[in-house]
Image (cartoon, grey):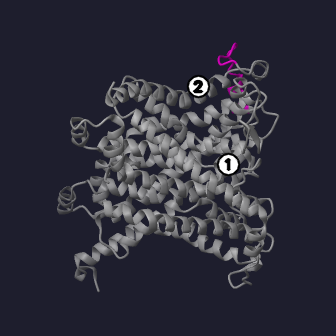
């Protein structure tokens, strides 16, 4: 068939595929194919030394999973990951909501405050973690000069606070998470707040609703969708996050999360199979959580429109 | 006092307090970063509580840039970031145009693929890429790193550009076609000039990802000091005791400043692109 007899529709289809192909090729080669390989590695006894012999048709086994799941370190890391993710997500969204409500109406200097709020999210993670490490340092950290007794925020697993035993380093890491990512929630919620029609609230004012009643019955119902979206996004990103915890504590002092174990097994222990197995379990747990979440919240969300 | 009057009064007081606290919590650390970067380490050790340096010095910057090698790291980061931006745009412009305008086989599935790539954990991807790059001898080379960054940014940039391309009126493109422009010529001469803000935003996004990224830089480059990016350089030197904290703070400023500038240059464009989906529902 020559080009002249091809229909316009066919030409369009071909052009579309041709134009999208560079995007597809790079995604398939750098993301999808390696991903499949990661799954295979999880079922093989692979190390960097023997990787060339392992091959595609090599010996498949469940040993990696059995080994990884039998280690108590894995389960405590999974628990840490969960606590860190749930608390980090909830706090960052709550803070973002407060910030968005406070900055909703104009005031002098709003542009400056808004810009300042965005910096923690925009700044490089290595710079902000180093800044936190310095500020919280027990010897010369500025925060500790304000306290009666210095606290080793990032290197102390347990501490006493008002008679309660608290996981100091884990709480610090969670606080960091809330501080660094609340701007993300702030941006989304503020955008939604500013797109809200004013007449609903005006009607509520006329009907005598107080500020908290207006928030509870007029504003919040319109925010649920964006909050639900934020909850999913932040949960997904935080659950597998590596940089923040690794840079703050290196996974020490009771803050080891699963992604740090994946890294340790990959580099220090040179156990590719066990590393991949843990990463796979982590991804699987994430998918299960998402499925449960969407099952319980996703459906209702759609009904409300 | 009625509940309404009480609440109004309460929030009139609370709001400025909250705003002040938020401003303090976000601005103070970065101001502290800058003031710490211009003093001598002795001053910090002797008087850790002071907010303002007694004697300003720029020796910290000279030290971090030359002796600690941050000039080289900055060059590496710039090379990586600029190539990522250029290739990402080159790949995602035709891709976004295809998704926005053309009906082709698998167009719907493409969206799903992009969403999956966007949400997919980098730590899972790190394992096979680490192995692959080790086997291919690409560890320590910036090329491999750029490749990974492109793959990570392309799904988002295609999405951002597509949203914008869809706002370009079809009639303009049709007019160009009637005047004898081929499809590529139409993109080049009509669509792209009309989409300059979106191209800016997309480029800035890719730049920020490439400049800030840490995990893959750590995995691929850590053994080869002359290939370190600024992020990796700072993280590696922060672990050693030989380099004074104030010098490293100067390094943090050097690392943070370009990104903050880039962000505020394109802030409006970037935040609108990022939250475009949120305004709909």
Whether residue B87 is visible here, answered yes or no, is no
Q: In front here: A96 or B227?
A: A96
Tell me the quadrant of the picture where the C terminus of chain B can be found.
bottom left
- Residue B57 located within the stretch drawn in magenta: yes
Residue at 42% in and 42% down: A187
Tag 1, which chain? A
User: What secondary structure is marked by label 2?
Assistant: helix
Image check: A263 left or right of A99?
right
Q: In front here: B36 or B196?
A: B36
- Farthest-out residue, front: B1
User: What secondary structure is marked by label 1?
Assistant: helix
Tag 2, which chain? B
Checking the image for residue B31, the label placed there is: 2
Residue at 63% in and 28% down: B33
Q: How many marks?
A: 2
**How much space separates mark 1 and mark 2, taking CA atoms?**
24 Å
Circles 1 and 2, Cβ within 8 Å, touching? The answer is no
Quadrant of the rendered structure where residue B94 is? bottom left
Q: Which segment did they paint magenta? A: B50-66
Checking the image for residue B124, the label placed there is: none
Please give the residue where the numbered disc 1 appears in the rendered image.
A245
What is the crowding at mark 2: few (fewer than 14 residues within 10 Å), some, or many (at least 20)? few
Whether residue A37 is visible here, answered yes or no, is yes
User: Do the residues indicated by labels 1 and 2 lie within the same chain of the protein?
Assistant: no
Quadrant of the rendered structure where residue B182 is? bottom left
């Amino acid at each position: 068939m020559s080009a002249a007899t091809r229909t316009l529709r066919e030409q369009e289809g071909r052009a579309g595929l041709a134009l999208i192909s560079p995007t597809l090729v790079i995604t398939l080669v750098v993301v999808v194919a390696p991903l499949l390989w990661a799954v295979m590695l999880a079922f093989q006894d692979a190390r960097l030394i023997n990787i060339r012999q392992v091959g595609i048709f090599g010996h498949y086994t469940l040993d990696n999973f059995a080994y990884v799941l039998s280690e108590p370190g894995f389960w405590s890391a999974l628990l840490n990951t969960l606590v860190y993710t749930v608390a980090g997500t909830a706090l960052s969204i709550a803070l973002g909501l407060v910030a968005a409500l406070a900055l909703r109406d104009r005031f002098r200097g709003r542009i400056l405050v808004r810009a300042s709020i965005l910096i923690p999210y925009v700044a490089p993670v290595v710079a902000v973690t180093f800044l936190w490490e310095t500020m919280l340092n027990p010897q010369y950290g500025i925060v500790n000069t304000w306290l009666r007794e210095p606290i080793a925020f990032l290197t102390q697993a347990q501490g006493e606070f008002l008679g309660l035993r608290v996981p100091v380093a884990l709480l610090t890491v969670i606080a960091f998470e809330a501080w660094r990512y609340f701007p993300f929630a702030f941006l989304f919620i503020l955008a939604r707040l500013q797109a809200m029609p004013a007449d609903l609230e005006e009607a509520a004012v006329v009907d005598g609703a107080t500020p908290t009643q207006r928030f509870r019955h007029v504003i919040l119902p319109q925010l649920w969708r964006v909050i639900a979206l934020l909850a999913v996004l932040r949960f997904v990103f935080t659950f597998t996050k590596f940089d923040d915890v690794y840079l703050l504590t290196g996974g020490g002092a009771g803050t080891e999360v699963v992604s740090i174990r994946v890294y340790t097994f990959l580099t220090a222990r040179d156990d590719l199979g066990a590393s991949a197995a843990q990463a796979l379990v982590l991804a699987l747990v994430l998918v299960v959580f998402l499925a449960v979440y969407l099952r319980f919240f996703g459906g209702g969300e759609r009904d409300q429109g | 006092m009625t509940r309404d009057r009480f609440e109004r009064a309460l929030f009139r007081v609370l709001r400025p307090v909250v705003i002040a606290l938020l401003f303090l919590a976000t601005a103070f650390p970065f101001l502290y970063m800058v003031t710490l970067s211009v003093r001598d380490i002795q001053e910090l050790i002797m008087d850790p509580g002071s907010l303002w340096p007694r004697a300003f010095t720029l020796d910290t910057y000279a030290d971090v840039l030359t002796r600690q090698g941050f000039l080289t790291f900055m060059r590496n980061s710039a090379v990586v970031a600029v190539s990522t931006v250029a290739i990402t745009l080159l790949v995602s412009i035709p891709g976004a145009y295809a998704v926005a305008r053309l009906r082709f086989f698998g167009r719907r599935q493409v969206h799903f693929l992009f969403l999956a790539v966007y949400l997919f954990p980098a730590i899972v991807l790190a394992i096979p890429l680490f192995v692959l790059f080790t086997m291919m001898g690409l560890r320590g080379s910036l090329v491999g790193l750029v490749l990974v960054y492109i793959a990570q940014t392309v799904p988002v940039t295609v999405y951002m550009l597509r949203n914008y391309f869809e706002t370009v009126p079809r009639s303009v493109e049709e007019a160009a076609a009637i005047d004898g422009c081929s499809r590529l010529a139409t993109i080049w001469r009509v669509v792209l000039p009309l989409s300059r803000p979106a191209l800016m935003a997309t480029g800035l996004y890719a730049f920020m990802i490439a400049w800030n990224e840490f995990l893959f830089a750590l995995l691929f480059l850590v053994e080869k000091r002359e290939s370190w990016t600024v992020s990796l350089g700072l993280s590696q030197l922060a672990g050693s005791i030989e380099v004074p904290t104030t010098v490293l703070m100067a390094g943090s400023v050097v690392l943070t400043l370009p990104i903050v500038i880039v962000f505020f240059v394109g802030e409006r464009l970037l935040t609108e692109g990022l939250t475009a989906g949120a305004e709909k529902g």
